[in-house]
Amino acid sequence: MRRALIVVGKAPVAGKTKTRLVPPLSHEDAAALSTAFLIDTLSTALSLGWERTTLVHPRGQASLLQGLVDPQVHLLEQPKDGLADALAYAFEQHFAAGFTYVTLIGSDNPTLPAETIRAAAAALESGADLAIGPTVDGGYYLIGMRRQHLGVFDGIDWSTPRVFMQTLERASQLGLRVHRVREWYDVDEVQDVERLERELASSPRGVAPRTRAVLELSRTARAD
C-alpha cells in the first residue's frame, strides 16, 4: 500500500496573496499568514508518515517554494492555470506513479486535524471510491480516491457555493461510493480569521504554531 497526500498551494506574494484580508491586515501580514498556513498544513501532512507528500503549485513558482517548504515535500508544477486542471493533473500523476490511495487537501485550513485526513484514508481503504470533506462555504477542503475518477472535476462551477453539491452529483452520475468526513472551514475572509483566532485560543499551543505566531505578531502590531 502506497499513500500520497497532495496539498494545493502557491508561493505567498505580498499584494497578490490573501488580498481579501486587507484591511484589517496589511499586504505583508496577509502574505505572512498565507506562508504560515502553508507551512503548518505541510507539517500536518508530513506528520502522517505517508509514502509521499506533494505540493501542487502554479507554474513558475518552484524556485520560490524550494526555499520555503520542507525538503521532504515533493513539488509538482501544474501544467495549466485553473483549479480543475490542477486537481485532475495531481491525481493523474500520482496514480500513474503507482500510489494506491491519493488524498488532496487545501492549504487554507491550517488547524485541520491529522485525524480527519486519516479518517478519509480509512474510508478509502474500507471500500469508498471517493472521500470528501465539505467546507462551510459550500466548497470542499479534502477529496480522496482509491482509483482515478477525474470525471468528478467536470462541469463544476468552481469558486461558488455549489462546488460540493455539484461534486456529489457528479459522483452519483459516475456510480461512485462516497464517504463524507467532517465539515471544516477555509480561511478566506476576515470573519474566517476571527474564527481561526477563537479556535486557536482554545487549542493546545502545538496546533498550527506558525499561524499562531503570525496572528499574535499581527495583533500586536495593529494594537500599537
Image (spheres, rainbow, N blue to C red):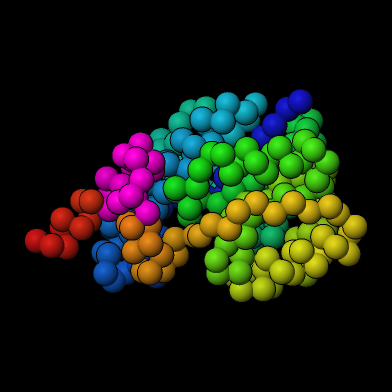
Q: Number of marks in the image?
A: 0
Question: Residue extending furthest front?
Answer: 202
Position of 217 relative to 20 (above/below): above
Farthest residue to the left: give it: 224
Camera-side residue of 150 and 65: 150
| Bounds of the magenta segment | 199-215
Q: In the shown orientation, is residue 8 left or right of residue 193?
A: right
Magenta run includes residue 208: yes
Residue 7 in which image quadrant: top right
**Location of residue 136 in the rendering, given as x and y in whole percent from the top left corner:** 55, 66
Quadrant including the N terminus: top right
- Does residue 81 show up? no
Identify the image quadrant of residue 81.
bottom right
Q: Quadrant of the C terminus?
A: bottom left
Q: Is residue 126 above or below residue 221?
A: above
Where does residue 177 sit, x and y in percent of width and height? 84, 52
Q: Position of residue 158 (x, y in %)?
A: 65, 69
Depth check, front residue: 204 or 92: 204
Instruction: Give the camera-side residue of 175 and 71.
Output: 175
Q: Is residue 37 magenta?
A: no
Task: Provide residue 91's location: percent of width, then percent of height.
Answer: 73, 45
Residue at 50% in and 47% down: 112
Query: Which residue is nearer to you in this view: 180 or 69?
Result: 180
Q: Residue at x 67, y 44 (%)?
A: 120
Q: What residue is drawn where x is 44% and y is 60%?
A: 187
Q: Residue at x 80, y 46 (%)?
A: 128
Q: Is residue 211 left or right of residue 96?
A: left
Corner quadrant of residue 176: bottom right
Residue 122 in sight: yes
Compared across the picture, whether 17 is left or right of 90 comes to left
- For residue 58, side relative to residue 17 (left or right): right
